[in-house]
């Protein structure tokens, strides 16, 4: 069986705050799954439940088909990076990886391999307290890779990385998925996930709003809208509205047209003699799609949410 | 077939558990030996204990003909009262430093069996305290043996040289070593419950030093005796007595047992809290 994370019907309250309200999704192997949602959507709580750190009031989380607590040598099943700053400052990166290795019955050779893989190099022998956030992220990724796990779960791994580091991390995550591993990555920067994730689990208020591929999400958000640039804005609006289009002004000389395909817009404007500079089918960025989705979370919650298969 | 598998599993299970337990122990040992604080604190336990003991011994006098009644063994081991503060700090740091940095989550992710982590940490802590305590106690008694006769505590006045061959002195020595180890476990258990470094340091120092001070000022003799019998360190320190045994509020081993019960209770409560609470 291929390794996955299966989260089904998680509920959790902290006092009067509902942190998780029926969170359900499955992370597939061989893909990078983006885990996105506004702050307080329950992403970190879900990750803590998956790792057995927090106990849900209801629901189950399975890693590689088992509850986390049942895993023998858990780091060989799942590698996780929750908080890159969670280090004792007086210990070197290498020694941090060493105690983790010892906890799994692994040897120092594996430690040196992941130090190399994460590009820590000679800095690994320095005290972790002096590390930049980017270095800590690399150390956290090294720790996650220690057990060569089929599943990886990273909370905001791009945080604090310099541009070079982001390119590296992106390529690294892609290569992990290409090797057949299941990779779950949370991020608040959708633009990063646009180039990294294959699949998206969008959350809001403790539950899944959308569980879809990146391509589908963008297509859905883009709709049939056409972007039009013209100096004769009001003239164009009249012509297109008469033809049944819904027209909105987006800029001083830019219109967004709905309900009419691009070719029909060109024909209409040409026939009416309205000058225009550009007509293009609108392609939403992931950021826009995400904004549209989370802006009206209620509407999307009414749609069927993909349940985890038992 | 099924039976064979079940038997096979039963046969490998204890071995697997033992190996896993050793891995957890090894990981916890690797943790403590790779931070600089550990070495300093362990050394400080021995140095501070011997230094305070030596200072007390140096100021003790037995003038000729006054019939002094000092317990020279207990006097020589006074530094334990100071050394226990360092033991407390070592015990608090053993887990509070993981809570303050958030590393406790990494620990429980790598080692999900929390009782196992607790047991391994307690074992490593004890393994650090015991050698330091042995050096501290041996150094203190040696200072007493060397300096006491010069201060008037001579065999002629009824004070033979301090020696471990003397039963009660041996009891005081072994008891003091165990006392320091138990204080460490008590402080560790309390910190597991309290988590925060500052709050834990305050709580354990209060637990160690307040009851003996309160006992001094309580006007009711009944309550004074209760404190001396049941407060963890007041009871535990009775193990150092070698004279006037009939006047002790509790027997030397009984007193140490009271401290052991406190330590066990703190560890059990810590274990339960650790298991029930989100990390």
Image (tube, coloured by chain):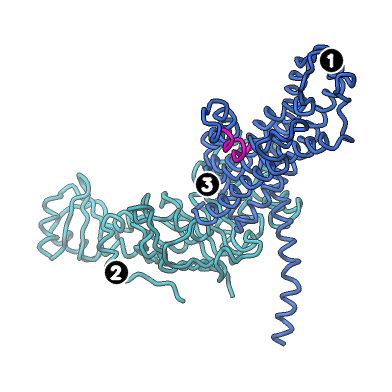
- Residue at mark 3: A83
Mark 3 is surrounded, within 10 Å at the Cα level, by few (under 14), some (14 to 19) or many (20 or more) other residues, namely many
Relative vertical location of residue B12 with respect to residue B221 in this rendering, above or below: below
- Residue at mark 1: B152
The quarter of the displayed image where residue B93 is located: top right
Q: Disc 1: which chain?
A: B
Relative vertical location of residue B55 with respect to residue B29 in this rendering, above or below: above
What is the secondary structure assignment of the residue under circle 1? loop
The answer to whether residue A186 is visible is yes
Q: Classify residue B137 as left or right of residue B31.
A: right
Instruction: Give the chain ID for the blue colour.
Output: B
Position of residue A257 measured from the top left corner of the image (x, y, whole percent): 21, 59
Is A310 inside the magenta-drawn segment?
Answer: no
Q: Choose between B201 and A300: the one closer to the eye.
A: B201
Q: Marks 2/1: CA distance?
A: 92 Å
Residue at (51, 56) in percent of width and height: B276
Give the colour in which the image draws chain A.
Answer: cyan
Same chain under badges 2 and 3? The reply is yes
**Range of the magenta residues?**
B224-233
Tell me whether circle 2 and circle 1 mark residues in contact (CB < 8 Å).
Answer: no
Q: Choose between A295 and A268: the one closer to the eye.
A: A295
Q: Earlier in the sequence, mark 2 or mark 3?
A: 3
Q: Which mark is residue A303?
A: 2
Position of residue B46 measured from the top left corner of the image (x, y, whole percent): 76, 30
């Amino acid at each position: 069986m291929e390794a996955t994370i299966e989260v089904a019907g998680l509920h959790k309250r902290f006092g009067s705050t509902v942190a998780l309200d029926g969170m359900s999704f499955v992370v597939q192997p061989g893909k990078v799954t983006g885990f996105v949602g506004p702050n307080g959507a329950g992403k970190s709580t879900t990750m803590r439940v998956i790792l057995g750190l927090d106990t849900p009031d209801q629901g189950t989380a399975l890693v590689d088909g088992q509850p986390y607590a049942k895993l023998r040598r858990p780091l060989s099943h799942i590698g996780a990076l929750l908080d890159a700053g969670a280090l004792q400052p007086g210990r070197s990166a290498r020694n941090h990886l060493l105690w983790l290795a010892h906890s799994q019955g692994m040897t120092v050779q594996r430690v040196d391999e992941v130090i190399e893989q994460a590009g820590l190099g000679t800095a690994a022998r320095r005290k972790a307290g002096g590390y930049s956030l980017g270095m800590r992220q690399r150390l956290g990724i090294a720790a996650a890779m220690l057990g060569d796990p089929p599943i990886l779960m990273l909370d905001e791994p791009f945080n604090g990385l310099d541009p070079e580091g982001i390119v590296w991390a992106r390529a690294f995550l892609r290569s992990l998925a290409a090797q057949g591993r299941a990779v779950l990555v949370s991020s608040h920067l959708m633009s990063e996930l646009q180039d990294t994730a294959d699949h998206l689990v969008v959350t809001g208020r403790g539950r899944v709003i959308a569980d879809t591929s990146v391509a589908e999400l963008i297509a859905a958000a883009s709709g049939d809208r056409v972007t039009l640039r013209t100096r004769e804005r009001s003239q164009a609006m009249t012509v297109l509205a008469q033809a049944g289009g819904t027209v909105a002004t987006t800029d001083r000389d830019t219109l967004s047209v709905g309900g009419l395909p691009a070719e029909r817009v060109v024909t209409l404007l040409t026939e009416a003699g309205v000058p225009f500079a550009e007509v293009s089918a609108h392609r939403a960025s992931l950021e826009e799609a995400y904004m549209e989705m989370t802006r009206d979370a209620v509407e999307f919650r009414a749609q069927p949410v993909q349940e985890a298969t038992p | 077939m099924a039976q064979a598998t079940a038997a096979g599993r039963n046969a490998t299970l204890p071995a697997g558990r033992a190996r896993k337990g050793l891995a957890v122990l090894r990981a916890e040992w690797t943790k403590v030996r790779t931070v600089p604080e550990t070495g300093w604190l362990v050394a400080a336990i021995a140095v501070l204990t011997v230094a305070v003991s030596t200072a007390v011994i140096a100021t003790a006098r037995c003038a000729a003909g006054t019939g002094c009644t000092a317990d020279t063994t207990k006097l020589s081991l006074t530094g334990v009262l100071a050394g226990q503060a360092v033991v407390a700090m070592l015990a608090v740091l053993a887990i509070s430093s993981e809570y303050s940095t958030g590393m406790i989550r990494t620990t429980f992710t790598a080692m999900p069996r929390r009782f196992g982590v607790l047991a391994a940490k307690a074992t490593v802590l004890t393994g650090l305290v015991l050698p330091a305590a042995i050096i501290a106690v041996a150094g203190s008694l040696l200072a007493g043996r060397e300096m006491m006769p010069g201060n008037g505590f001579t065999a002629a006045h009824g004070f033979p040289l301090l020696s471990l061959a003397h039963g009660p002195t041996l009891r005081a020595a072994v008891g003091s070593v165990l006392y320091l180890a138990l204080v460490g476990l008590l402080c560790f258990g309390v910190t597991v419950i309290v988590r925060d470094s500052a709050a834990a340091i305050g709580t354990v120092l209060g637990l160690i030093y307040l009851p003996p001070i309160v006992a001094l000022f309580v006007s009711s003799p009944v309550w004074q005796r209760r404190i001396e019998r049941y407060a963890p360190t007041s009871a535990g320190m009775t193990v150092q007595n070698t004279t006037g045994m009939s006047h002790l509020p509790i027997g030397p081993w009984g007193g140490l047992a009271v401290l052991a019960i406190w330590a066990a209770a703190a560890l059990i409560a810590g274990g339960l809290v650790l298991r029930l609470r989100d990390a």
